[in-house]
Amino acid sequence: MIASFSGLTILCNVMGGEVTPFFIWAMYSEKESAINKYEIFKIRVNDSTLIDYTSHYTDNNRLFLSAPLSYYYKIKQNNFKEPALSFIKKKLGEKYTAIQPLAAKLYNGNPDAKQFIEWYVRYLQQSIGKPVYRLDVSIVTTHFDASRQLLTDSNYSLIQWKQL
Amino acid sequence: MFQRTLLCRLVFAFIFFFLLYYQYSNTMAHQLQSPVLIFPYVDITYWIFHLLKIPDFITHNYFAASCFDSLLFITCILSFLFPGRRIFITSFFILYFTYYIIFNSYATQHTHSKAGMLLATIPFMVPDKMFYYLWEATRYFTLFIYTDAFLWKLLRFSIFKKDHGSLVIKKNFAGFLYYNSNSYLANSFKWLLEHPVIIQTIFLAGFMLEGCFIIGFFTKRFDKYLFVISILLPVGFLYLSDAFFFELLVLSFTLNVQLKLSNAGIAAV
C-alpha cells in the first residue's frame, strides 16, 4: 500500500499532473509573470460599506469570498461558458466528443449569472454578519509605479445587484 | 501502546482545533449556502465524487449538511476519546476526505494544505503491528513534501529569477496593499519591495530550508531541527506568499516524536 502510494505520487510528479491524493507539492515554484497588472475586487454593499476581503477575515473565509468571484469573472470573460470545458476541448481536439456527455454532467455547463450572484449575496451576508440589500462588485486594475506605489488604472463593473 | 494513544490524541486535538477554525471561517458544509460554481478540474477523484453527486447532495440540503458536519465533529471527538477504536478513526477519515473534496470544489481552488490532516490519521486506522511502519511512512512523506517543493523550484529555475520574490509579493498582496496601504504590515511590504535583494535572499533561504529535508531520508539525527524548520516554513509562506499551510503542521509530529520497535512493542525515542 505504502509502495503503491509513493509510486503513484512520484509518477504524478514526473508526469506533471496530479490526481487526488497523489499531489504535486510545488509550493509557489511557478515562474512569475513580470506583467505589471494586478486585478483587485472592490466589493461594496448597501451603497456605502466597502468589504476589505483581504484582511478582515480568516484565510479560509477569504478564499470563499474571492476565489469563486475570480472564477465567475473567468466564466463571464469566456461568454458564460465553463473555462475548464474550453480547456479540455482544446486539449482533446476531436476526441472531445467522446467525453462530451460526461463533461457536461460534471462541469458548470453554461452557468447562470443570477444564481451565482444570489449565492454570493447569501454567503457574503453570513460572512459580514449583516443583511445585504445591494451589492456592487467591480474589478480595479492596478499597477506598481517606480516607487512601488499601487496606482489604479481602470474599473470594470462585474456585479450590480439590488434586492427586489 | 501508550505512545500510539498519546499520538492519536495529539493528532485529533490538532484536527479538532482546525474544525473549530473552519466553523469560525464559515466554511463548514452547512455554511456554504448551497454554492453554485464547482471546480472539479481535470482530477478523476473529483469527477467520481461529482458524478455520484455527493458534494451536491450534502451542500444543497441544509439538514444533510448539518448532519455531515456534526458527524465530522463527533467522529473527531470520539477518535480523541477512544484512540483504540479504529472504526471512529476510519469514519472520520472518510468524512474528512469528503469534506476535503467539497471544500476545494466549491472554493474553486484545489488547495493542498488540508491533505496533511487526512494523511496524519492513516497510521491510526491500522492494527498495532502495522502502526510503526505507517508512522514511519508518514514521516518519509512529510520529508517528501518539502523535498518536492525544493525540487520543483530547482527544476523550474524560478527561484533563481532575481525578481521572483518581489513578483510573488506583488501578486499576492496587491489587494491587501490597496485596502490597507498605511498599515504596519503594508509598510513592511513596501519596505521589502524597495529592497528586492532582501526579499530574494529570504526566498532563497526558504528554498534552502526546504532542501534540508533531503537529509531526513538518510538519518533521523537532525529531525529536531527539521521539526523547527517545518514550523518556520508555514510562517514564511503566510507572511511572504499569503498562503495558509498551517494544517500541514500536523505531519510535523512525525519528526518530533520518533518511535522504535522493541521486543516489548513500540517505544518512544
Image (cartoon, helix red, strand yellow):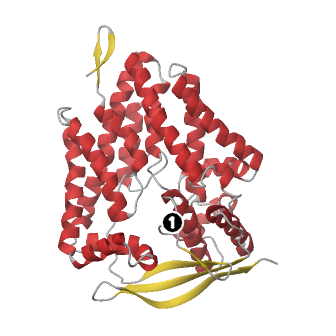
Crowding near the residue tagged with mark 1, few <14, some 14–19, many ≥20 C-alpha atoms within 10 Å: few
Residue A33: image x %, image y %?
A: 34, 76
Q: Which residue is at a point 47% across and 67% down the rendered structure image?
A: A55
- Report the residue that reaches farthest toward the top: B264
Chain under disc 1:
A
Q: Which residue is at a point 29% across and 45% down the rendered structure image?
A: B230
Identify residue type, mark 1: His
Left or right of A132, for residue B185: left
Left or right of A86, for residue A27: left
Left or right of B250, for residue B165: left
Relative height, residue B182 to residue A98 (above, below): below
Q: Which image quarter holds the N terminus of chain B?
A: top left
Instruction: Look at the numbered disc 1 and give the secondary structure of its residue.
Output: loop
Q: Which image quarter holds the C terminus of chain B?
A: top left
- Report the residue that reaches farthest toward the right: A164
Along the line of sight, the residue nearer the viewer: B84 or A150: A150
Q: Which residue is at a point 43% across and 17% down the rendered structure image?
A: B128
Residue B24: image x %, image y %?
A: 57, 52
Report if residue A36 is visible in the image: yes
Q: Which residue is at a point 52% across and 57% down the rendered structure image?
A: A60
Relative height, residue B57 to residue B14 (above, below): below
Residue named by callout 1 = A56
